Every structure is written in C-alpha cells, then in structure tokens.
Image (cartoon, helix red, strand yellow):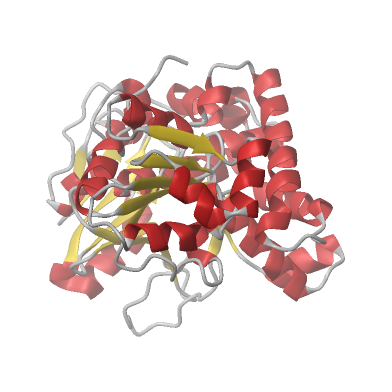
C-alpha cells in the first residue's frame, strides 16, 4: 500500500510542541512505527530505536537509565511496553530538562491500564491512540462527520452508491495496512497469523508469564462471532469451560492489546432501568471478517453477519475520527434500556453535549429506526446536538428535529 498520511499526525505534532514527551498507543501493525518514522524523517526526532530488536531490548532491560541517557534526543522509543521500567527512566531524564518533545514513545499494549505505569509521567506526557487506517485516510478526505453532527450540519450527500454491496469490500478489508490489498484467502491467513503471533509474543508481558495463549485465542474467536453484543461473561465461561473471573482477566488482556473494545453504556439518569454491561466488539472490521472467514459476498448475502460487521465498521470509523475531531470528545458509548430502547453509538463531548448514531444496512430509513434517537433527544433536550441513521441509501435526508439519514459514505465526506 502506498504511504498514506495519517490524520493523527497533526495531533502528535501539537502534543510534542507543548509536552516533554508523547505516548502513541495502538495495535501492532496499525502504522505507529511508520508515523513515528515519518516524524523523524521530518526532523522532529534525531534517533529511533525499537524494543522488538533483541539487542535493543536486552540493553534497555539490563540498564533502563543508562539506555535512555545514551539516546540522541529527541528520540523515538518504539514498543515501549516491552520494558515498562523505561518510563521511570524517561521521567527522571525529562525532569532534568525543560525542552519540549524530548521523547515519542509508542506502545502496542495499553500502558494506561498497567499498574504503576499510568502514574509514571503525570504532567509530562500526553497520550494519543493510532488505530488502523480509516476510510477518510484511504480516500484522502477529511472525515468530519462528528464535528458536523455536533454543529447540527450533517454532510449534504447525494448520488451515493446504494446498498450494502457498495460498501462490502471496504468493510471486509478493514484498515490494517499490510492486509488491505490482499485477496480474501491471504487476508484470512494474515489475521490468523497476526492474532496467534500477537498473543504468543505479548500475552506474558501484559498478564503473566504463565498465561495461557489458548484461552485468549478461544475467547477472541467467541468474541468475533458475537461482536457488538452485550457482554455475558457467564456465557463465555460456560463455552470455554473456565471460571467467570478467568474470562474477565483474559478479556481485559484482549482489550489492553487493542484487539477488543469494551464499549461502556451511556447514562445520565434518564429514569429507566438501563443495561449496565459493556458491549464487546473487535477493533477492526477486517480483523473481524478475518476471524470469521467473512468475505464481501458474505456481507451481502448473510443478514446476521452483515449487521454485526457493519456496526463494528461504523464504530471503528467514529472512534478513530474522535481522535482528531475539532470537538473535544470524552467518550463513545452505547445506549440500551430494559424497555428495548437502544442506540448503537452515543458520542459525548467534553462539554456534555451528545451525538447519537444508528447503523442500518438497508437503503431505506423508517420511523421505527429512529425510536431510540428520538427518545434520547427528547430526554436530553438542548444537550442533544444531533442524531443520524447511517444507511446505505444515496442522499442525506432530514428525518425530524435534529435527526437525519446520512449515507454510510458520510463517514469520510
């Protein structure tokens, strides 16, 4: 795949301009090292080392302070989660200097959840997340749907391709750069090797040396066929013949490795009994299709698979877009209550306003498709900035007060 500029690049440049260090987190093979290398080539960093190289790893592990002190700064340290002790060494060094942008650290496991690590660099570092490529990056478009919905100004789309078939290939390919241009067969093989290698190499670093990779892989396969469902850990425990606590522990690991999202329910005391468990989904639609052997043709012909994969695709696009949106986003959630009202994605801004989004594989939107959106709008009032049903029709259409039907391609308009 030709080199693609990442929308998050400007955010990273801003972070290192005002902070002593930046941490770039995200899944392996998502493009973190490539982006860091581009920033080095642009002159923002003088040196680049990766802890995936055995000699570098050994040197860093044996003497973290000495290793950091010998780097030609500003420096990139890639895959820093492999030697977490380096963070304390970086802290000690940056405390002795007032320069901005002394380090860019990248990690393929979520350092924010590691005991003691999240507190290693308070006030000295800012975190950013780089996910696999978005459709807006692939197509070279801005990707401003979230900002436009918060401004109650959805993109005015027309003459867009109609039907899920128009999007099926992009959804099945996902955003991992190394997998994108492969055939179905080679892409399935890529993701099989990807998850097996990732779990084998990083599971012990995140959980414990005695962790069992087979449990993590079996759990991930179960999650793939249930992506988008509310978590029922007891059901997973029965299927895997392990305890509920074991499922919870390994689920946390898969989330730390950026293979799974645990999407938390949104609540603002709406006066109804709400579902409190997270909804689980894989972090990339290509990964999901690779884990379940689903092709573009499968998405067209199998309604059960289509809905699950489309919802995953839409969520991943929105989540990645939130990383560079002009609107300060505090979180992405879902809404569901015991009266069967639900909304696929609730995006909350730092100022408390929300945008709500439903996903529909059909090319027609009916009033029943907006029931959850209308419920949230009426309950939240002025704090409801706007809502959209992303559908496979051709045109942006107003549906009701602050509600629109927007073609799926509006994600990268």
- Res. 53 visible in picture: yes
Q: Nearer the viewer, residue 359 or 206?
A: 206
| 290 relative to 297, above or below | below
Residue in the image at 22% along x and 39% along y? 144
- Res. 52 visible in picture: no
Counting from the top left corner in percent of width and height, residue 383 is at 17, 69
Which corner quadrant of the image does residue 84 belong to? bottom right
Residue in the image at 63% along x and 28% along y? 298
Please state if 222 lies on the left or on the right of 139 as rendered.
right
Residue in the image at 73% along x and 34% along y? 192
| 232 relative to 294, above or below | below
Please state if 169 lies on the left or on the right of 122 as rendered.
right
Please state if 138 lies on the left or on the right of 153 as rendered.
right
Q: Nearer the viewer, residue 265 or 249?
A: 249
| 117 relative to 78, above or below | below
Counting from the top left corner in percent of width and height, residue 7 is at 29, 35
Counting from the top left corner in percent of width and height, residue 299 is at 57, 31
Counting from the top left corner in percent of width and height, residue 338 is at 49, 76
């Amino acid at each position: 795949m030709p080199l693609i500029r990442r929308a998050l690049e400007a955010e990273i440049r801003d972070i290192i301009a005002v902070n002593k260090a930046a941490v770039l987190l995200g899944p392996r093979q998502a493009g973190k090292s490539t982006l860091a290398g581009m920033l080095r080539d642009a002159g923002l960093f003088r040196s680049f080392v990766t802890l995936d190289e055995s000699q570098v790893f050994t040197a860093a592990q044996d003497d973290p302070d000495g290793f950091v002190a010998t780097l030609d700064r500003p420096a990139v340290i890639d895959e820093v989660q492999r030697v977490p002790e380096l963070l304390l060494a970086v802290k000690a060094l940056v405390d002795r200097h007032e320069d901005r942008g002394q380090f860019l650290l990248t990690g393929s496991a979520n350092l924010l959840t590691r005991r003691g690590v999240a507190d290693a660099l308070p006030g000295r570092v800012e975190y950013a997340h780089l996910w696999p490529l978005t459709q807006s990056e692939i197509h070279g478009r801005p990707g401003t749907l979230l900002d436009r919905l918060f401004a109650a100004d959805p993109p005015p789309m027309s003459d867009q391709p109609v039907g899920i078939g128009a999007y099926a290939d992009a959804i099945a390919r996902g955003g991992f750069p190394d997998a994108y241009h492969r055939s179905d067969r080679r892409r399935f093989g890529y993701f099989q090797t990807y998850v097996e290698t990732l779990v084998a190499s990083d599971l012990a670093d995140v959980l414990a040396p005695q962790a069992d990779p087979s449990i993590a892989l079996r759990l991930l396969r179960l999650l793939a066929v249930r992506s988008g469902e509310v978590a029922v850990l007891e059901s997973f425990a029965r299927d895997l013949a392990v305890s509920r606590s074991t499922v919870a522990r390994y689920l946390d690991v898969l989330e730390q490795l950026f293979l799974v999202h645990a999407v938390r329910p949104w609540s603002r005391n709406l006066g109804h009994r709400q579902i409190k468990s997270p909804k689980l989904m894989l972090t990339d639609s290509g990964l999901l299709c690779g884990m379940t052997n689903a092709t573009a043709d499968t998405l067209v012909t199998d309604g059960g698979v289509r809905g699950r994969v489309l919802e995953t695709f839409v969520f991943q696009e929105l989540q990645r877009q939130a990383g560079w949106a002009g609107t300060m986003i505090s979180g992405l959630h879902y809404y569901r209550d015991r009266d069967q009202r639900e909304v696929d994605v609730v995006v909350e801004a730092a100022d408390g306003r929300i945008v709500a989004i439903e996903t529909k594989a059909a090319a027609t939107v009916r009033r029943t498709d907006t029931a959850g959106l209308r419920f949230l709008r009426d309950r939240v009032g002025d704090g409801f900035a706007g809502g959209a049903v992303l559908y496979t029709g051709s045109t942006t259409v107003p549906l009701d007060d602050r509600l629109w039907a927007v073609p799926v391609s509006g994600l990268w308009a």
